[in-house]
């Protein structure tokens, strides 16, 4: 897959992305707003393992966010199952040096359009910790709507937090 937005790309991960991915991902400020399965510290071996797992998946659900020189983030989706088979959860992160430039908003807009065009999803969702208002703003700018506040829903680093739930419906769908 190759999606272009501004001067950035969403593309397939490759084994050669591991070093840059590990360098950008090894940041506690990123790990603090993601699920605990995201390693912290983030080692080269973590990136290599993630990339290998991603490349072996069918369908591939995680992709690089990159310049023409290096990967600096990841965006992906988790498809729903059973009665949720027409829904998916979207997740993402980018390296701190790329924060505040509108890059993530552009990536989410392009990626969600791709998901609606290529999969039978009616609804995409994303959860954001209440401690991460920047990510909530990114989702809103990318066309997601806040649909719920799940009180005391997550525990991260020993702190009980609310989770803000966002969703975006397939264009033209009334629901």
Image (cartoon, rainbow, N blue to C red):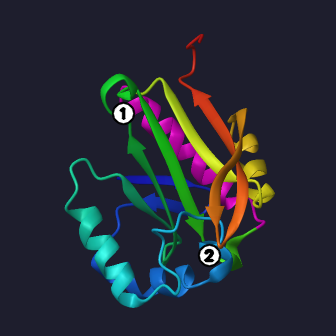
Q: Nearer the viewer, residue 147 or 5?
A: 147
SS at circle 1:
helix
Q: Residue at x 29, y 63 (%)?
A: 54
In this view, the residue farthest toward the top is 174
Magenta region includes residue 78 = no
Element class at badge 2: loop
Magenta stretch mostly in which secondary structure?
A: helix
Q: Position of residue 4 (x, y in %)?
A: 51, 54
In the rendered image, which residue does mark 1 sit on?
Answer: 118
For label 1, count other residues whose C-alpha is less than 10 Å away and answer few (under 14), some (14-19) or many (20+).
Answer: few
What residue is rendered at 33% in x and 72% in y?
Answer: 50
- The residue indicated by pointer 2 is 95
Relative to 13, does residue 42 appear above or below in the rendering?
below
Judge from the rendering whether residue 56 lies leftward or rightward of residue 150; answer left or right: left
State if disc 1 and disc 2 touch (CB < 8 Å): no
146 vs 92, left or right, is right
Is residue 109 at least partly visible in the picture? no
Which stretch is magenta? Answer: 100-120
Residue positioned 78% across, 49% down in the render: 137
| 29 vs 76, nearest the viewer | 29
Residue 17 lies, with reference to residue 168, above or below; the image says below
Query: Which residue is rendered at x = 45% and y = 68% of the image?
Result: 37
Instruction: Inspect this view and state whether residue 37 appears.
Output: yes
Residue 32, horizontal then vertical, whole percent: 65, 72
Which label's residue is closer to the chain start, 2 or 1? 2
Q: Looking at the figure, which quarter contains the C terminus?
A: top right
């Amino acid at each position: 897959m190759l999606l272009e937005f501004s001067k950035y790309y969403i593309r397939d991960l490759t084994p050669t992305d591991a070093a840059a991915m590990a360098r950008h991902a090894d940041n506690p400020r990123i790990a603090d707003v993601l699920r605990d399965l995201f390693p912290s510290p983030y080692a080269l071996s973590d990136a290599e393992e993630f990339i290998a797992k991603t490349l072996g998946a069918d369908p591939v659900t995680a992709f690089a966010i990159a310049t023409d020189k290096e990967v600096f983030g990841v965006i992906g989706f988790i498809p729903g199952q059973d009665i949720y088979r027409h829904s998916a959860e979207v997740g993402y992160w980018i390296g701190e040096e790329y924060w505040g430039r509108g890059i993530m908003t552009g990536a989410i807009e392009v990626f969600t359009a791709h998901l609606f065009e290529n999969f039978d999803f009616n609804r995409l969702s994303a959860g954001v910790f209440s401690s991460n208002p920047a990510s909530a703003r990114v989702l809103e700018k990318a066309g997601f709507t806040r649909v719920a506040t799940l009180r005391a829903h997550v525990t991260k680093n020993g702190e009980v937090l609310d989770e803000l739930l966002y969703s975006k419906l397939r264009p033209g769908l009334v629901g």
